């Protein structure tokens, strides 16, 4: 179930972004992660200029629906929970969450209809302490402590992806098999019988008592390969050609 199906989607708030291109790439990152409401606080450049639209790579609908505010207070006025992203330690007492922790909270709040926002600071300096004063929680994504700075779009993508992946049901591993399907047991048994028959003719089984174990080992090799129907047909052909007797 996606965040949208669970409840209210989070809002991403870009505070004083400096370059139109960065706003465009942030919109692209948002669309990648199914986050579609952008708010801008006092941007330096027009978020609908050609450079921003081009940088969005097809996510310009997010730019066109973005709302612009003069201050953080106005941008977060209707939100019930606000998270502020920062990579620097701050001299204030607030809960600090990882990206995963933020995502879990936002998904839980969304299910209950609570409207959340995530704030991102200017490219050069990040959020100021006065901006953080409007946040309920701080988000700090663990990275290499020797180099943890992110550009705006990277920060947006990381935060958006953490939210998106919690509700994404894509399996961790799939076998891509265009124009075929996994071989069924009947197909693989015919293959093993064909292989055993030809190995027998070639004198492979020199020790009758070892024959069951040798075939079992061969069977296990092929079973680990997760054969498709096309694989089985190909292997039948290989065996036929290798054993062709003039």
Image (cartoon, rainbow, N blue to C red):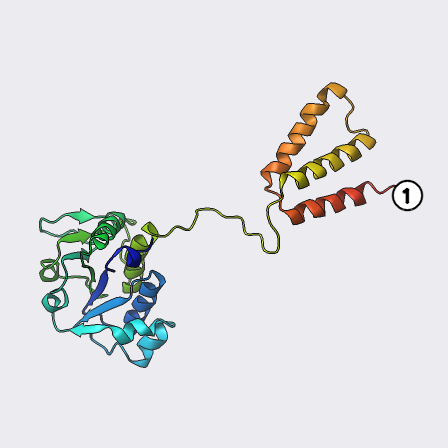
* Residue 241: percent from left, percent from top: 80, 45
Residue 169 in view in this figure? yes
Residue 30: which quarter of the image?
bottom left
- How many residues crowd around disc 1 within 10 Å: few (fewer than 14), some, or many (20 or more)? few
The image quadrant where one finds the C terminus is top right
Q: From the image, tell me which residue sits under label 1.
A: 246
Q: Position of residue 82 (x, y in %)?
A: 16, 57
Q: Residue furthest bottom?
A: 50
Q: In this rendered view, identify the residue nearer to me: 38 or 49.
A: 38
Count how many numbered circles sit on residues in the image: 1
State whether residue 202 appears in this view. Answer: no
Q: Secondary structure at mark 1?
A: loop
Question: Looking at this view, is 121 or 214 the one in front?
Answer: 214
Q: Residue furthest right?
A: 246
Q: Residue at x 30, y 53 (%)?
A: 162
Residue 50, quarter of picture = bottom left
* Depicted 43 relative to depicted 97: above or below: below
> Which residue is located at x 33 percent, y 52 percent?
167
Would you say 165 lies left or right of 115 here? right
Q: Residue at x 26, y 74 (%)?
A: 65
Q: Where does the image place residue 112, in percent across and percent down from the top left? A: 20, 53
Residue 231, relative to residue 196: is it above or below?
A: below
């Amino acid at each position: 179930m996606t965040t949208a199906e669970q409840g209210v989607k989070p809002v991403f708030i870009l505070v004083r972004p400096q370059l139109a291109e960065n706003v465009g790439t942030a919109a692209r990152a948002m669309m990648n992660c199914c986050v579609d409401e952008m708010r801008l606080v006092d941007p330096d450049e027009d978020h609908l200029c050609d450079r921003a639209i081009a940088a969005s790579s097809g996510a310009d609908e997010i730019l066109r629906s973005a709302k612009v505010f003069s201050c953080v207070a106005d941008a977060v006025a209707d939100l019930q929970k606000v998270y502020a992203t920062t990579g620097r330690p701050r001299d204030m007492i607030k809960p600090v969450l990882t990206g995963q922790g933020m995502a879990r909270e936002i998904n839980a709040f969304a299910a209950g209809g609570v409207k959340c926002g995530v704030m991102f600071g200017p490219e050069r300096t990040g959020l100021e302490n006065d901006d953080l004063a409007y946040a309920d929680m701080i988000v700090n994504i663990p990275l290499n402590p020797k180099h943890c700075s992110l550009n705006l779009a990277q920060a947006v993508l990381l935060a958006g992806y953490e939210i998106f992946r919690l509700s994404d049901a894509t399996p961790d591993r799939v076998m891509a098999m265009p124009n075929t399907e996994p071989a069924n047991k009947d197909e693989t048994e015919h293959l093993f019988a064909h292989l055993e028959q030809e190995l027998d003719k070639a004198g492979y089984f020199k020790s009758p008592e070892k024959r069951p174990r040798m075939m079992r080992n061969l069977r296990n090799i092929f079973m680990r390969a997760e054969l498709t129907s096309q694989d089985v047909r190909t292997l039948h052909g290989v065996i036929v050609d290798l054993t062709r007797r003039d």
